[in-house]
């Protein structure tokens, strides 16, 4: 489950970068992807952005050790 969340962080970040037109999606060569994103229905954009934000928050909190830490090793 945790590995799936961490792997899902990559497309979630790509989606946010596409929405904000930052990183490679702000370059002239890829700006048409951002413009195509803006032509999608707003309700679909919002659902996808909400899902992407949730995935990024879940992954970041796990990486910071706030969520689902592995149990401590037993003392020997």
Image (spheres, rainbow, N blue to C red):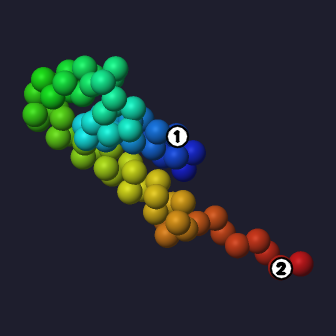
- Residue depicted at 12% across the width and 23% down the height: 39
Judge by depth and name the residue closer to the eye, 50 or 74. Answer: 50
Do we see residue 46 in this rendering? yes
Q: In the displayed structure, does residue 22 sit left or right of residue 4?
A: left
Q: Position of residue 68 (x, y in %)?
A: 53, 63
Q: Position of residue 69 (x, y in %)?
A: 58, 66
- Residue depicted at 45% across the width and 44% down the height: 9
The residue most toward the right is 76
Instruction: Give the label on residue 71, or none.
Output: none
| Quarter of image, res 40 | top left
Q: In the displayed structure, does residue 45 sit left or right of residue 56?
A: left
- Position above or below: 19 against 36: below
Q: Position of residue 22 (x, y in %)?
A: 32, 40
- Position above or below: 51 against 11: below
CA neighbours of label 1 inside 10 A, class few (<14), some (14 to 19), many (20+): few
For label 1, the residue is 7
- Residue depicted at 31% across the width and 33% down the height: 26
N-term-proximal mark, 1 vs 2:
1
| Quarter of image, res 29 | top left
Q: Position of residue 52 (x, y in %)?
A: 33, 44
Judge by depth and name the residue closer to the eye, 21 or 44. Answer: 21
Quadrant, the C terminus: bottom right
Numbered marks: total: 2
- Position above or below: 76 against 52: below
- Residue depicted at 66% across the width and 69% down the height: 71
Do we see residue 1 in this rendering? no
| Quarter of image, res 57 | bottom left
SS at mark 2 in the image:
loop
Judge by depth and name the residue closer to the eye, 39 or 55. Answer: 39
For label 2, the residue is 75
The residue most toward the left is 42
């Amino acid at each position: 489950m945790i590995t799936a969340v961490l792997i899902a962080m990559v497309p979630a970040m790509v989606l946010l970068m596409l929405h904000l037109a930052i990183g490679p999606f702000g370059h002239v060569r890829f700006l048409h992807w951002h413009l195509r994103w803006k032509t999608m229905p707003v309700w679909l954009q919002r659902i996808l952005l909400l899902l992407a934000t949730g995935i990024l928050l879940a992954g970041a909190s796990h990486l910071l050790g706030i969520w689902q830490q592995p149990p401590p090793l037993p003392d020997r």
